[in-house]
Image (cartoon, coloured by chain):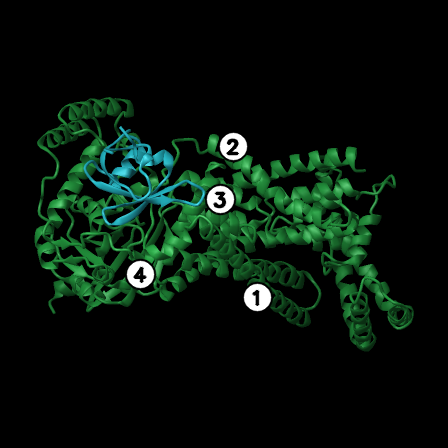
Amino acid sequence: MPTLDQLPRGARARIVDVTGDDGLSMRLLEMGVVEGEEIECLGAAPLGDPLEFFLRGYRLSLRIAEARRVVIDS
Amino acid sequence: MSATSEATSQVPLTVALLGNPNTGKSTLFNALSGMRALTGNYPGCTVEKKIGSFKVGQRKISLVDLPGTYSLAPRSLDEMVAVNVLLGRQSDSPPPDLVLCIVDASNLERHLYLVSQVLDLGHPTILALNMVDVARDRGVTINLAELSKRLGIPVIPLAAHRGEGVAPLREALVADPVRPPHRPLFPAAFEVEQTQLADWLANNGAGAFPAYLVARLLLDVGGYLEQHVSGVDPAALSKTLAAARGRLAEAGCKVPAIEARVRYAWIKTLLDGVVTRPVSRPITRSDRFDRILTHRVFGLALFALLMLVVFTAIYRWAGPLMDLCETGQGLVSELVTARTSPGPLRSLLVDGVIGGVGGVLIFLPQIVILFLFIAILEDCGYMARAAFLMDKLMTKVGLSGKSFLPLMSSFACAIPGVMATRVIENRRDRFTTILVAPLMSCSARQPVYALLIGAFVPAATIAGGWLDVQSLTLFGMTCLGAVVAIPIAWLFKATLFRGETPPFVMELPPYKWPSPRLVFSRVYASAKAFVVRAGTLIFATSILVWAAGYFPEDHTRENQLATQLETLGDQLAEPLARREALEAEASEIESRGIAPNESVAAELKSVRAELDDLAQTDLLAYDDLVTQRNQLAAALLERSYLGRMGHAIEPLVKPLGWDWKIGVGVMASFPAREVIVATLGTIYSLGGEVDAGDAGLQQALKESTWPDGRPVFSLPVALSIMVFFALCAQCASTLMVIKRETNSWFWPAFTFVYMTVLAYAAAWLTNQLATRWLA
């Protein structure tokens, strides 16, 4: 299954799962990165990392390593 | 009014204010309680305790500001404090009568996550729906009456930055409290496990445990609570929890995902038909800003430009203000000197008290200016972008993008740098940043470099005249701390602050105009914190060092000389003024050009001749007395406690190539690095009023010898002193601010020890290498 870091800029996908049960996973879940939700990639920082996403009406920034925890559908 | 209601009106209503970061929580706090807030720390942690007091009609209200958070799932002691305050388990904070939860109306879905946790606590709750104007502009409509009905609590619309809605909110605070209805969110399987765990806890020594915390124990894998249930064996608890979570996973309630799933599902249902938003995502003005501000090229260029502006401002704007502080200090010293006779009282007042207070105030302009920038950048939303831009760079050092600005600020002064680390919410990142911030080359190191480079580094050029050695040395010294900080930060992260990499996961809030009131209150609060809380300790340290340099010697003779000098100075006021004017003239002539022509040389010669003439005639006796006084002062300092300590530690500093005089200088400069210049001035019998560019002091250093006649100072020794000062923690103010920010004496002590050891080792190495290669 693809993960969120592979989502091209401007593309949308549906969240399938957040893997792991550590602090990072919990933080992602709290921020609304939850199964079934739609998420859009807005781009990356000038140095290539972190990435920027849009979900639930707000903008969220994640490092590539963090986006890799989020499984998406396409 | 009846007797009982009068009595209750005297007991303040405790209201806890809670919300996500970037919600306008601080703006609301200020709007409700004004600038009058009591601040402090909750014991044992770095969470700021902030309580505002105000009245609605006759009712006193005490408003407890809790730190901005996305969730009430504590992973650290700091996060646990907010939960404890809400549950009335924090001993130094009364249990709240009411919870005021502030949310962003334009981003309701995510903000209601925290609200759903707050409602689980069962307290009377009011929902403040902030930024309704922003939501409206974005085409979001909210049916407030329906939202309030579905939640079962009052909902008050607000535009806190404009003060709209604050009056109805104040009224709502004193209205009859409304407890939210119980609404089972979690599936039956979870409720069963929760009941079982509550029973297990009661039977295993935990006593009565709030239901919310029982749920947290189940949900927060590796959370703070797991290790901190008093009276319960942690190993047994872990086993019980693992088994319960295993059963939950089998029942389709996998922890921790289950919580977010049920809460967001509840939010979806709650908002269905209550909130309508435009079908397509509107491109806001904030988005257009971001296209430039986070652009691959322009974004970085603008960031660099901004840093340059901040820096220039600190140096340029703070410079005149700092000079003003110094001038003021000088005037007060003169005034005190004129009103007192020479003796311990005058010395205490002038050298101890005024010097100590001046030492505190001198940093204030830099702190105020830097905090002005930080408050503006934070309030307008750029701070998150700065972290976004710099994160990749900072992760290479093991830190995060949020550490960039505090470290950058420390190049001007570590005090505001350390205070600015509050934006870093992760404790490990924050503490690492605090510990390495004093390594950045601050402005107080410049006088030390200027003195020693001026005296010992040859004014030669290399690379065909393109580079001059003095500037190169200065550049090297300025970079040294930052370069050393890289492995040190990495080492701290790998040892002291080991653990999983803290999540970056950060919201990029929409841009908005900063609120002048909020900016002002932030700057005021940090200035006050520095002056009051750190200032008293810095002051005490200065007095202590003064006393060590004054006692136990008898200063009678010195005081006699000082009195004689004053009388003679009054008599010779005219020639003294003449000499001052001539000296100014001479330095003005000298500064005119590198290649003086004949007429300039002649002019200088005649001025010099007149100066010599003055020294030989009218001022002969005066100068003789000054020399006597300075020699006596040097002797007194040598025999003082400080001087004795200097002699005692000479074996320790000898490997660095230093003699006892340098040792005394280093010890005397504990309150602030730049003090070494004045101390060396006193030790070398030149009086304490020398500055770093003083030719006499530079000459005295060059002529200083060991008892066997070898010169003390050489290029290697000068370099080793500079390296020591580049890396040491000779700054009481920084250490006191670290104490304040970490709420512990351990960390300033640790900083002092690690930096001193580092500075010593590096100074030794420099002396060894330089002696081999340069001398």
Decide which of tag 1 and tag 4 comes sooner along the chain. Answer: 4
* Figure colour of chain B: green
- Given the image, on which type of amino acid does mark 3 rest? Ile
Task: Name the one closer to the observer, B255 or B377.
Answer: B377
Dots 4 and 2 on the same chain? yes
Q: Residue at x 84, y 43 (%)?
A: B711
Decide which of tag 3 and tag 2 comes sooner along the chain. Answer: 3
Which quarter shows the N terminus of chain B? bottom left
Q: Determine which residue is flagged by label 1.
A: B321
Indicate the position of residue B164 as horizontal and vertical percent values: 23, 67
Decide which of tag 1 and tag 2 comes sooner along the chain. Answer: 1
Decide which of tag 1 and tag 3 comes sooner along the chain. Answer: 1
Indicate the position of residue B320 as horizontal and vertical percent values: 59, 66
Which quarter shows the C terminus of chain B? top right
- The alpha-carbon separation of the residues under discs 4 and 2 comes to 39 Å
- The alpha-carbon separation of the residues under discs 3 and 2 comes to 14 Å
- The alpha-carbon separation of the residues under discs 3 and 4 comes to 28 Å
Q: Secondary structure at mark 2?
A: helix
- For mark 1, name the chain: B
- Given the image, on which type of amino acid does mark 1 rest? Leu
- For mark 2, name the chain: B
Decide which of tag 4 and tag 2 comes sooner along the chain. Answer: 4
* Figure colour of chain A: cyan
- In which image quadrant can residue B375 be found? bottom left
- The alpha-carbon separation of the residues under discs 1 and 2 comes to 38 Å
Residue B491's disc is 2
Indicate the position of residue B459 as horizontal and vertical percent values: 79, 51
